[in-house]
Image: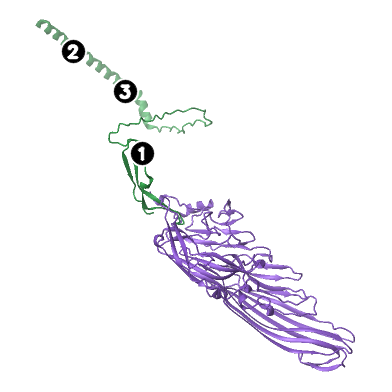
Chain colours: A green, B purple
Amino acid sequence: MALGDSRRASGVTLEQQRRAIGTNNEKARRDIGKSNEASRRGTAQLVDDLNRLTVPAKEPRRLRTIQPRGLLPAARGTASNLPKPVSNSGGGGIASPLTEQDYLAREFWPDGLVSSDGLFFMPAVKKVVMQDANGESATFEYAQPVSP
Amino acid sequence: MNPANVPPWGCPWHGLVKAGQLELPNGEFIDYPQPFGFWYHQGVTHGVRHPDAPGDPRAPEQVAADAALGREWRSSAILAGLGCQLYGKSLGTAQWIYIDPLGARWLASTTLSQVYGATRQVTLQRFGDFGAEPESYTYTFAVPPYGNTTPALSITSTQFDMCSIKPDGSAALFVMGGVYGPEIADIFPWAPLGWIELSLSGPGTDCVPVCEVVKTRAQALGAYSYSENYVPQREWEQGPNSDPVYGTDDVLGRTIQLYFKFFRSRYLSSNTSTLTDRVMAMFYSPSGERQELTLSMEGSGTVVATQEDMVFLEESYTGTMSYQTHQVMDVTFKLNGVAIDSRKYEFERTDTNDVVSGEGKEGAYGTLNASWTITSARSTDYSPGEVLSEGPTVEEFEVGFQGFPPRSGSIGFLTMYGTLMDDANDAARSVLDGFLYYAYFAGASSNTAGFRPVMHSINMYSIADIRVYDGGVTKMLTVGDCLTPAGKIYAPPIERAQSAGNIFGSWCPDTNSVARDFVPVCWV
C-alpha cells in the first residue's frame, strides 16, 4: 500500500469513529429522557414502592412428593469382577501362592486362648515360614497377644 | 490377637442329666451322654478348678444373653461318672486331670488297684494343649501295706474304687470295700473298709507321687461296744393240782390271792451299745481339704419281758400287772468331727393288763400302748456347706400290736446287734444291714421303725428312715438331708418301698445343688 493510500484510510476511520460517538451520545440523551418521563408518570416505580409497603403473603411450604411404594419390578443387575492378572515377574515381591512346608517349624507364643474352665489352651502363632511360588522363603512374624 | 476380643469357649452346657437329657438353665433339654458305671458311680462328680481359668469376663448383658440360650461359660469343670466324663466324653476309668504348679494340665492314670503291690505307677499325659507335642511321663511310687487284713471279716469279695479327686487333681482317694451279699446292695453296695491317697506334686515333667494309707480297716470300723445285763426277777410255777395259794406278787408290789395255776417267767434286762466314728466315706471338700464322714451310735434301754400263761381255777380274781420299757438310740453323722445330721429314736411302752377271772375262765387282758418317737436334729450351722434345714422335728410313730398274748422274744434295741452280728468283727456288716430296730414280738405283727445309711453316689449320702407297718408294708423315706463334700444340703424327701432298687443321687461341685431320684441322675 502507497503512503497516500494509508493516510486516506486513516482519515476515513477517524471520521467513522467520530460519527459513531455522536450517534451514541444522541441515543443516550434520548434514553435518559424516556426514563425521566416514566419516572414522572410513576408506573413501574410506583408498583415497586407499593409492594415495599405491603407484607407479602407467605407461600405455604409443602413436603416433597413421595411416590407411593410398592413392589419393584424385577430387574437384573450385573457387575463384573475381573481378576487381576497374576504377575510372575518377581521383581523383589512375593509370588503367590504361599505354601507352608513344615508345620513343626511354626513357633508359638506362650500366651494364647484359654477355655473358660482353663482346661484347654490354644497358643497364639508367633512365627510361620512360608514358601512362595518361586521357591523363595517368606516369614510371617506375629505380635505377642496382649492381656485382656 | 487380643484375647479380650475372643468370646469365651469350651463347653457351655451344664445342668442335670437324666435319661440322656440335659436340662439347661433356660429350661430346654438337649441330648447328652448319661454318665455311666455301677449305679453308685452314675451320679458321682469331681470338680476341676484351674487357678487361671478365665471364666466368662464379658459384660453382664452378654452373659445374660447366653444364659437365655442355655449357655453358661463356667470357670470350672466337672468329671462325671466312672469314666470321668468331661464335656460328655469319657477320659477313662479312674483317670483325672492334674494341674501342676505351672498351670499345665496332665491326664493322670495309675496302676493302683485292690491287688496289692509294693510299687505302682502313675502316668501323666499332657492334656488340653492344642498344637503341642505329645508328652507322657510315668513315675513309680512305693505302696505301703493296705492295712486291710485285720480284723478278719466274713466278707466274700473286695471292692476298690476311686472316690474323690482334689479340685486341682493333686490327690486322689481310693476306697477299699467289703462286699457281703446282695441283700442290701441297692442301698449301700459295700462296707467301706479303708482309704488310700495318691498325691502328686511338682511339674508334670518332674512329678513326685506319694502313696499313703489314710484309713486302715481297723480305723475305718471305728470303736464298737455292747453290754447286756440280764437279771431274772422271778420264775415260779403253781402246779395244777395244788391247793389255792396265797402269796405276794413281788413284781406288782401288792398281795393278791392266787387261786389259779400260774406259770410266769419274768426278767429284767438292760443293755448299752455304742459305735463310735465308723467311717462311712471320705472325700475332698471344694477347697481341697480331705474330709471324713463318720457315723456314731449310742443306745441304751431297759427291757422287761414276760412269758405267762394262766388257767384260773376257783374264785374270781382281779389284779393289775404293768411295766414300762424305755429305749433310746442316738445316731449322728459327723463331717470332720462336726455333727451335721442326727436321729434320735425313742421307744416308749406302757403295758397295763387288767386281769379279771372267774372259775374256769381265762383272763381277759387289757390294753397295751407303745409308740416310737423319732427326733431328727435337722438343724446345724455346719460350714462351709450350705445348710437348708427345717429345724428340729419330732415324729410320733404309733406301734400297734396284734395277737396280744402269748408274746415272747425281745423288745426294741435288745436285738440290735445280737441278731445281726456274730462277733464284734462284723461291725462292718452292722453298718450295712443292721440298723433296723424292731418293736418285735414273736407271733405278732407289729410296726417297726429304724434307719439305714444310704449311698446315693460314691460322694453323696443320706439317712433313710425305715417304716414297717402292720401287714408288712414297708417304706423307706429318705427324709434326711444329703451329706456331701460341701456339707449337709437339703433335698426334698422321696419315698419308696424298701428293697425296690437304687436311690440315685448326685451333688454338683459348682452350684452345690443335689438331686435324688429313682433313675440315674448326674450333674455336668
Looking at the picture, do discs 1 and 3 lie on one chain?
A: yes
The answer to whether residue B156 shows anywhere in this view is yes
Whole-percent x, y for residue A111 in the image = 38, 53
Q: Residues within 10 Å of mark 3 (few under 14, many from 20)?
A: few
Residue at left 78%, top 80%? B407
**Image quarter for residue A34?**
top left
The residue beneath circle 1 is A98
- Type of amino acid under label 2: Gln
Q: Which of marks 1 and 3 is nearer the N terminus?
A: 3
Label 2 SS: helix
Q: Is label 3 in contact with label 2 (beta carbons under 8 Å)?
A: no
Q: Is residue A145 above or below residue B472?
A: above
- Distance from Cα at disc 2 to Cα at disc 1: 85 Å
The quadrant in which residue B439 appears is bottom right
Q: Which mark is residue A39?
A: 3
Q: Mark 3 lies on which chain?
A: A
Which residue is under mark 2? A17
Q: How far apart are marks 3 and 2 (CA)?
A: 33 Å
In the rendered structure, the answer to whether residue B373 lies left or right of residue B8 reads right
Residue B81 locus on image (x, y percent): 56, 59
Q: Please tell me whether residue B224 is drawn above or below residue A30 in the rendered image.
A: below
Q: Are marks 3 and 2 on the same chain?
A: yes
Labels 2 and 1 positioned on one and the same chain: yes
